[in-house]
Image (spheres, rainbow, N blue to C red):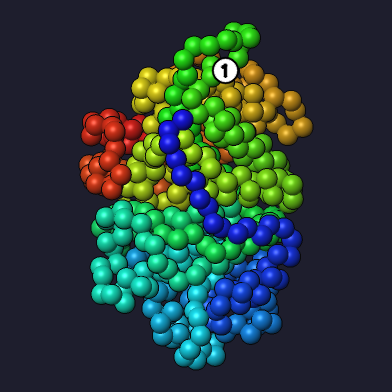
Amino acid sequence: MKDFVYHNPVEVRFGPGVVAGLGARVRAAGLDHVVLVGGGEAARRVGAYDQAVASLSASGVRRSEVWGVTANPDLGTVLRIATAAGTGTEGSIGHAPGGGTGFVAIGGGSVIDATKAAAALVPLLAEGRDPWSPFAERKPVTRSLPVFAVSILSGTGSEMNGNAVITRGASGHKWGMRCPSPVATFVDVTFQQGLPWHLTVNGAADAMSHVLEFSVVGTPAAAGLRRKDTEFPFFAEEAVLAQNEALLRTIVRAAARLRADAHDAEARGALAWASGVGLSGLTGVGLGAGSWESHALEHAVSGLHPHVPHGLALAVIYPRWMEEVAQDKAPAMRRLAAALETTVAEALAEPGEDGNPSALPAGDRDAPERCALLLGALFRHWGAPAGLSHWGVTGGDVERLVQLAREYPRPLQLAAERVERVFRASL
């Protein structure tokens, strides 16, 4: 394993009714005012907003509110949220000078990302800094106003990490910032009961891609004792890869159950926790920086076309990228395919039936491309579109998409012609 430092300071409160403790936890952090940030009506509809407001009010925490965060949030929205922390003008409710101010994000990954970014930009804006500089320079921001998250949608893992992905307006640059993690996150999966399937699968595909971005860079260890020919070869990062494979299988199994019953509480809980852990840092220890090439490609797509859902676009792009790099990463690809084969067969079976290997794609089970075939079949079974053209992406966009992907602050290992090939295969 490569050397690493692991530190994740997020306090996670998981279970029914945990939002009742939000106000006391905010108070314990020395705050008497928060900017409450939301997206559309979902937070109110599922009851998360009412519970959060009741808890804050009971603890004497005043609030301002900023609404309207959309999927793939842009820098303008982030600046609007950051400004509210200083002025209290956005829907201000009893905001008076004095006391500590923080943020409460109620929503999914877009709301939480936008809130974390805003909290990190407040000190920089006070210094007159360019708000895009943390994204362009990829230098971690270490000072931030405190953020608390109430998660009502699982997939991005934003509630358990110090990352925030934001789009820079019309330029199409969708880049990430390293910033402080939430102080505390509240995960009550009752808010997600009955969630529409397209939102569930969007989150599941996103969560899987996070784990996969690390798992594709595993390193086979030197040959050693093997008890049988069918046993996985031992990898240098064995403990982490085995954990990651368990997370991937859990996400697939949970999503399959939720496809059959959107109110399956056990599956909701499993998916929520696996999604958070999937990008909490644990899945990358000892694996270096991982790959993240597919994310660079997808960020180009949804940066240029903000209406494209991130997770479902990854469900289109990721198998195509895997096919392109299968020979480059053959040992890790073979291992992933072997780890997922049975679980994918179960997911492809009709509800109530046992997994049937005949439902799996044909071909050599030992081929490095096998994992791409399995994931492609799984995502199509879940209803992911056949290509990016479903959202209006055309061949005329490819040149600009390649440029955006190549401009991504984390350099790609793929040459431009290979990036273009993945985009064209994804159309």
Is residue 311 in sight in this rendering?
yes
Q: Counting other residues with Cα less than 10 Å from the Cα at mark 1, is it few (<14), some (14-19), or many (20 or more)?
A: few
Q: Quadrant of residue 45?
A: bottom right
Give percent across and percent down for residue 328: 36, 22
Give percent across and percent down for residue 281: 50, 45
**Is 216 rendered above or below residue 232?**
below
| Residue at mark 1 | 232
Q: Residue furthest right?
A: 352
Give percent across and percent down for residue 114: 44, 64
**Is 53 rendered above or below residue 168?**
below
Looking at the rendered image, the quarter that the C terminus falls into is top left
Q: Is label 1 in a helix, a strand or a loop?
A: loop
- Camera-side residue of 27 and 173: 27
- Camera-side residue of 404 and 64: 64
- Camera-side residue of 250 and 28: 28
**Is 148 rendered above or below residue 35?**
above
Is residue 396 in sight in this rendering?
no
- Quick check: 318 left or right of 271? left
How many badges with numbers are in the image? Answer: 1
- Quick check: 57 left or right of 111? right
Residue ID at (28%, 75%): 127
Residue ID at (28%, 47%): 408
Residue ID at (48%, 89%): 98
Q: Amino acid at mark 1?
A: Phe
Give percent across and percent down for residue 103: 51, 72
Residue ID at (31%, 55%): 139
